[in-house]
Amino acid sequence: EAADADADEETKEETKEEEEKSGDDEDDIEVSDEDAEAEKPKKQKEVTTYSWEELNSEQAIWTRSKEEITDDEYQGFWKVVNKQANEDATAWSHFDAEGNINFKSLVYLPSEIPPQLLQGNMDEYKGGLKLYVRKVLISDEFDLMPRYLSFIRGVIDSDDLPLNVNRETLQESKIIKIIKKKLVRKVVEMIRKLAVDSEKKSKGDEDDAETKEAEIDADGNVIEVEKEDDDEEDDEPNKYIQWYKKFAPSLKMGVIEDDANRGKLSKLLRFHSSMTDGEDDFVSFEQYVGRMKEWQDEIYYFAGQSEEEMESSHFMDKFNEKGVEVLYFTDPIDEYMVQNVRDFDGKKLTAITKEGIKFKDEDEDLVKRREKYYQKQFKPLTKWLNKLYGSDVMRVAISKRLGRAPAICSSSEYGHSANMERIMRAQAFTHGSNDGMMRAMRIVEINPRHPFVHKLLDACPKEDDDLVTDETMDAAMMLYDMALMNGGFPIADNAGYSERMTRVLKTMLDVPDVTLADEVDPPEEEDEPEDVDTDDLDGMNMDDFSDFDMDSLDLGEEDI
């Protein structure tokens, strides 16, 4: 028992010591500042974040490969460049120029004439090319094209040009001059390709047509297949001709001004001729040369105001008789152009309105003998007419080409034509000019086979002292007037022409004199009321006003 008591006391003491120890441990626990702060509510701060979305992720169209670009994309960019939503481009050229100077370009050929060119103000028209340097726009209207190609629109982007210079300095840069030269070549090539492709499409490929029209069966026999009619393709006009009719003067100006590309531009020209038929039927110099007569070594042209006048001109008589084709030049610029294009493919361009026209299919010996005979026979007449016409004409000659007309007035081989004289007189800002500078050297050609000329030969004076009747003088001057009009020249003396025609009418109408009849003095008449047209009043009578109430009208005494 004593042992159990001692064990209980030891257990109590151990328990007491543990309780005291645990109490000391609780007193030793300390609360840190961090735990205290963690118990407090955290402060919140608003933070704005931004996300960017690239809307225009596409590259500039001229920097992309042309194999990846559709025609619709090209046309869409053209409408942006041209600022015309309803107009499509006729053609375009997308290229990368590589070499000493590298640049990318996309140029367009418009389908409609700009308003400034339509009015003839070529000097006031600003170019439509946009210049970029490393995709940075330098100018909206940079002068990169010659005047005759000012209608070209598009963009040029070069990495070789400096950015930190002004526009005037950049304009004189050698790099710009090289770019200009390459651009002109590319544009001319684009127009040439349009012409070639259009002609091929209009004529069609005969080999492909035969392949489509015939098939071969298993036995090797040819099966004829009817060709499907395609009216839309047949009626489709030549694309180049439609464009050329609008921009022909610009190309002809290029022939005048651009010596380096004159040969290429000459091949792009198209004309109506005595062999063409229809508004859209044109002929080029190459086609003309290809269908020339075997004996023919010259390209004949006729410059005038309209095709109708030229077709009925007496200058065409001999050419129609021999079936020789003549080109019609109807644009005013044609006269200036032909001064710079003297020949094509070794064939000289010759105006049929000039003197000295020769046809090499004729017997030269026979022509010379006839000429010598006629000169001797009509020497009195030509001598008298030269004296009568005086300085108005260069000379009177015997014609070797007239058929129907008694006389015609041609011009010297190296002088102005009648059409050129008309154009020069129409210049609005001509300063200090005189009639001699504008006047063509006129040559009166008389027809030795015409009865009028034979009658004049009989009536003309054989010697200087011989008297000449008034009728003979009038006939000679009327022959001159006729020659001027047949040659396209204006009447030299309008007053004299009027007097001569008055005398002709007196003879034709058997009027002894032209004394005017007395003025009439009609009696005075009383004024009569105008007749009323009752046709418009048909169907109106008093019964139509039976329902009209006069009392409903608010009329005062003054109105009554």
Image (cartoon, rainbow, N blue to C red):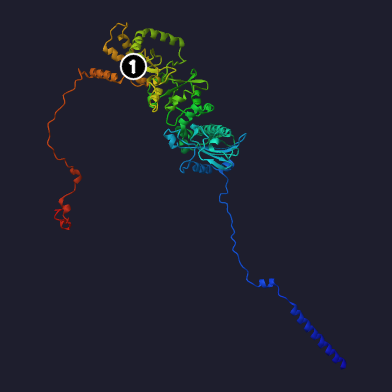
Regarding residue 275, the answer to whether it shows in the image is: no
Above or below 5: residue 21 = above
* Residue drawn at the location 58% of the way across and 32% of the way down: 174
Q: Residue furthest bottom?
A: 1
Q: How many marks?
A: 1
Above or below 193: residue 49 = below
Q: Residue furthest right?
A: 3
Q: Secondary structure at mark 1?
A: helix
Above or below 207: residue 453 = above
Percent of width and height locating residue 200:
52, 32
* Residue drawn at the location 37% of the way across and 8% of the way down: 379
Percent of width and height locating residue 208:
55, 34
Camera-side residue of 381 and 323: 381
Camera-side residue of 27 and 332: 27
Percent of width and height locating residue 560:
14, 53
Regarding residue 286, the answer to whether it shows in the image is: yes
Under mark 1, the amino acid is Tyr
Percent of width and height locating residue 487:
37, 20
- The crowd level at tag 1 (other Cα within 10 Å; few <14, some 14-19, many 20+) is many
Left or right: 72, with 512 as reference point: right
Which corner quadrant of the image does residue 70 belong to?
Answer: top right
Residue that badge 1 annotates: 480
Which corner quadrant of the image does residue 552 belong to?
Answer: bottom left
Left or right: 424, with 472 as reference point: right
Camera-side residue of 313 and 32: 32
Task: Name the image quarter holding the N terminus.
Answer: bottom right
